[in-house]
Image (spheres, grey):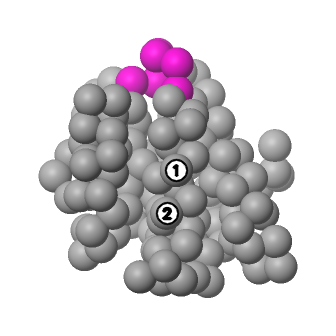
């Protein structure tokens, strides 16, 4: 697991419930792993945007993590991209979405890692593949 370079991001993760934090940290690690695969020579920027942990790659669109409602967590993508629309077409029976903004996840259920891997990769390479 990557160490936190931003104390504000660490504080934000420390404020989540145990279940939410475990799932969000797993997704965070997936984002870092995929970033290293798709752009090994570029740095992934982690900071807080809108008080949410945010991950930005040079050729991608920001990906944010946070809670959604009382019990769920979400991966947020910029609403002016067509990413959620594409994900919905690809994974309509496998993932849950909120409008054109987010993938909603139950932190108590097993994470759909392979589906999330594809979505995250598309987000991190969005401007490269547009």
Which x, y percent locates residue 109?
46, 16
Q: Which residue is mark 2?
A: 122
What residue do we see at 46% from left, 24% from top? Answer: 107
Counting other residues with Cα less than 10 Å from the Cα at mark 1, is it few (<14), some (14-19), or many (20 or more)? few
Q: Which residue is mark 1?
A: 118
Which x, y percent locates residue 128?
53, 83
C-beta proximity under 8 Å, tags 1 and 2: yes
Measured along the vertical axis of the image, is residue 123 above or below residue 13? below
Counting other residues with Cα less than 10 Å from the Cα at mark 2, is it few (<14), some (14-19), or many (20 or more)? many
Tell me where the magenta segment starts and ends, as one range.
106-111
Q: Nearer the viewer, residue 55 or 115?
A: 115
Measured along the vertical axis of the image, is residue 13 above or below residue 18? below
Q: Nearer the viewer, residue 126 or 14?
A: 126
Question: Which image quadrant: the N terminus?
Answer: top right
Tell me the SS state at disc 1.
helix
Majority SS type along the magenta span: loop
């Amino acid at each position: 697991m990557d160490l936190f370079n931003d104390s504000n991001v660490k504080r934000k993760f420390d404020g989540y419930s145990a279940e939410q934090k475990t799932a969000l940290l797993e997704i965070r690690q997936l984002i870092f792993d995929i970033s290293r695969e798709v752009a090994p020579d570029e740095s992934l920027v982690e900071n807080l945007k809108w008080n949410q942990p945010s991950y930005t790659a040079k050729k991608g669109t920001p990906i944010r993590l946070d809670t959604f409602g009382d019990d769920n967590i979400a991966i947020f993508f910029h609403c002016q991209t067509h990413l959620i629309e594409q994900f919905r077409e690809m994974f309509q029976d496998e993932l849950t979405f909120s409008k054109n903004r987010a993938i909603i996840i139950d932190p108590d259920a097993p994470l759909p890692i392979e589906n999330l891997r594809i979505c995250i990769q598309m987000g991190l390479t969005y401007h490269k593949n547009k």
